[in-house]
């Protein structure tokens, strides 16, 4: 048998899978970790511990539990949260904790400055994107402005996947899909780094080499083999951001296919055969030449449910805390008895792109219980997702179907609320493991052991979440209130902590 290893580094846990040529998972493993929040608006990981340390531990554990020889693993693919900003020195050692994706809003001043200097029209022409908290360029400028001594020592600025691939192969590489989030540093017309901002932000020489996701970046070195348990010489792909691997894992491959990822945030990818231009959405070349991606994301979802459990579920214990809270929420009626939650606990990304947005629990009275507030939080996420879906439709994006993936699909209140509020059916595949499984598939594709269409055989659709028309009127009314709550309080939000 031939096997393929995929490992993904997520916001709150790392996961791995070893998969055979028929798509069967023969071994899996995971490691939990925490997102570091050293101050409001910041979000970080320790790359040595959370990224490389967990990659090594998971790889060794899976090879042992699968009972196979390391040489039977024919290719390795990895993904990670992103886009991130990690400066490393000449030896590839991290100079600081990694600055995470759009949930980290520290570069708000740099976003405003660069947008003013470059102009929105020019930003859209160069990178197909406006500058938001999702953009890597302003975060590099933040490093340059606020940590000049570290910036001076920076040899390369890496993403999570490029850090792992360097540890595995010794090469600094980044796939085009991930690189395109480094706006305004990536030129979408030429699929290359631009030197236009070499003096203002960073020179292309300090960025990784560019490859397509299924290109082979290199092979496992002797040092990496000793640390991971992999065989020396095993091919390693260029990797990508976790959300893209997750989309691949559930068969998102044709124009009009949309992935809705229930993770620490809701992240959404629509594959298209043409570029969709809208400053509220993010653009990237897709993992394969000739295709495009139109992306969006909220700033919280799983992070909000975890926060709620930590603060209000302390009487619950064990691995069933989230299950117990979901069961309670199911006892509250649709509409949560009038409780409406703005889920902007880390600002918000799509469609408002407001790093100053704040969370809100609205409509409370003395009859409300924990179940109502938790259901309100889940429905608040659903209202936020509906705002995203409506943005795609306003942008004339060719949305045809939605495939849901991630741990949140196992929460029936949450997933049903999203279908009920949006009016869209969600398909759920047989395997919902996500990015680690998608990585294993991409590894097989990279060495020619699988074709892109084989994912339908590897992971067929198992069920559907259809919208309940009876709930549409109450959700339509609550959704209008949801929008008004933000519009009528957004000017107060930047001053909430004053």
Image (cartoon, rainbow, N blue to C red):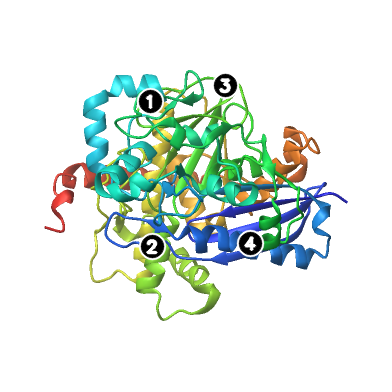
Mark 2 element type: loop
Mark positioned earlier in the residue sequence (1 or 3): 3
Q: Earlier in the sequence, mark 2 or mark 3?
A: 2
Q: Name the residue under label 1.
A: 278
Which one is in front, 3 or 56? 56
Q: Which mark is residue 273?
A: 3
Labels 4 and 3: the sequence-earlier one = 4
Give the mark nearest the N terminus, 1 or 2.
2
Per the model, the C-alpha gap separating discs 4 and 3 is 38 Å
**Which sits in the foreground, 300 or 129?**
129
Q: Earlier in the sequence, mark 4 or mark 1?
A: 4
Q: In the image, which is nearer the foreground, mark 4 or mark 1?
A: 4
Residue depth check, mark 2 versus mark 3: number of the one nearer the observer = 2
Q: Is mark 4 on a helix, strand or loop?
A: helix
Q: Which residue is drawn at 55% across and 55% down?
A: 9
Callout in the foreground (4, 3): 4
Residue 116, position in %: x, y?
Answer: 21, 28
**Image coords of residue 380 (percent x, y):** 36, 52
What label does residue 247 carry, if any? Answer: none
């Amino acid at each position: 048998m031939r096997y393929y290893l995929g490992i993904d580094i997520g916001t709150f846990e790392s996961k791995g899978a070893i998969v055979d040529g028929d798509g069967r998972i023969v071994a899996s493993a995971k490691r939990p970790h925490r997102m570091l929040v050293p101050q409001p608006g910041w979000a970080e990981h320790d790359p040595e511990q959370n990224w490389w340390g967990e990659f090594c531990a998971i790889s060794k554990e899976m090879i042992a539990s699968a009972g196979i020889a390391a040489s039977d693993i024919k290719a390795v693919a990895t993904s990670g949260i992103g886009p991130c900003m990690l400066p490393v020195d000449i030896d590839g050692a991290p100079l600081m904790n990694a600055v995470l994706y759009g949930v980290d809003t520290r570069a708000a001043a740099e976003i405003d400055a660069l947008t003013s200097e470059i102009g929105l029209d020019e930003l859209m022409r160069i990178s197909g994107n406006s500058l938001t908290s999702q953009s890597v360029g302003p975060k590099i400028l933040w490093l340059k402005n606020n940590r000049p001594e570290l910036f001076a020592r920076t040899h390369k600025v890496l993403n999570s996947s490029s850090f792992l691939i360097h540890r595995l192969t010794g090469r600094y590489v980044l796939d085009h899909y991930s690189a395109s989030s480094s706006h305004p540093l990536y030129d979408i017309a030429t699929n290359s780094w631009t030197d236009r901002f070499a003096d203002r932000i960073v020179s292309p020489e300090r960025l990784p080499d560019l490859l397509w996701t299924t290109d082979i970046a290199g092979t496992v070195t002797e040092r990496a083999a000793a640390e991971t348990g992999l065989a020396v010489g095993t091919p390693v792909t260029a990797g990508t951001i976790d959300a893209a691997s997750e989309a691949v894992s559930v068969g998102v491959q044709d124009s009009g296919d949309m992935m809705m990822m229930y993770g620490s945030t809701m992240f959404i990818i629509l594959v298209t055969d043409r570029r969709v231009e809208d400053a509220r959405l993010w653009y990237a070349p897709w993992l394969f030449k000739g295709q495009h991606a139109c992306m969006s994301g909220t700033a919280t979802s799983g992070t909000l449910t975890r926060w709620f459990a930590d603060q209000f579920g302390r009487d619950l214990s064990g691995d069933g805390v989230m299950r117990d809270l979901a069961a309670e929420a199911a006892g509250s009626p649709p509409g949560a008895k009038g409780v409406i939650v703005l889920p902007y606990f880390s600002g918000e990304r799509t469609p408002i792109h407001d790093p100053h947005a704040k969370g809100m629990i609205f409509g409370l009275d003395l009859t409300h219980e924990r179940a109502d507030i938790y259901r309100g939080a889940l429905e608040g996420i659903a209202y936020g997702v509906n705002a995203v879906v409506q943005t795609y439709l306003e942008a004339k994006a060719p949305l045809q179907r939605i495939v849901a993936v991630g741990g949140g699909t196992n929460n029936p209140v949450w997933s049903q609320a999203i279908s009920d509020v949006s009016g869209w059916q969600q398909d759920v595949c047989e395997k919902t493991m996500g990015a680690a499984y998608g990585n294993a598939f991409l590894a097989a594709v990279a060495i020619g052991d699988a074709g892109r269409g084989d994912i339908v055989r590897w992971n067929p659709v198992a069920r559907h979440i259809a919208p309940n028309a009876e709930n549409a009127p109450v959700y339509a009314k609550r959704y209008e209130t949801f929008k008004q709550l933000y519009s009528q309080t957004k000017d107060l939000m930047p001053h909430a902590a004053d």
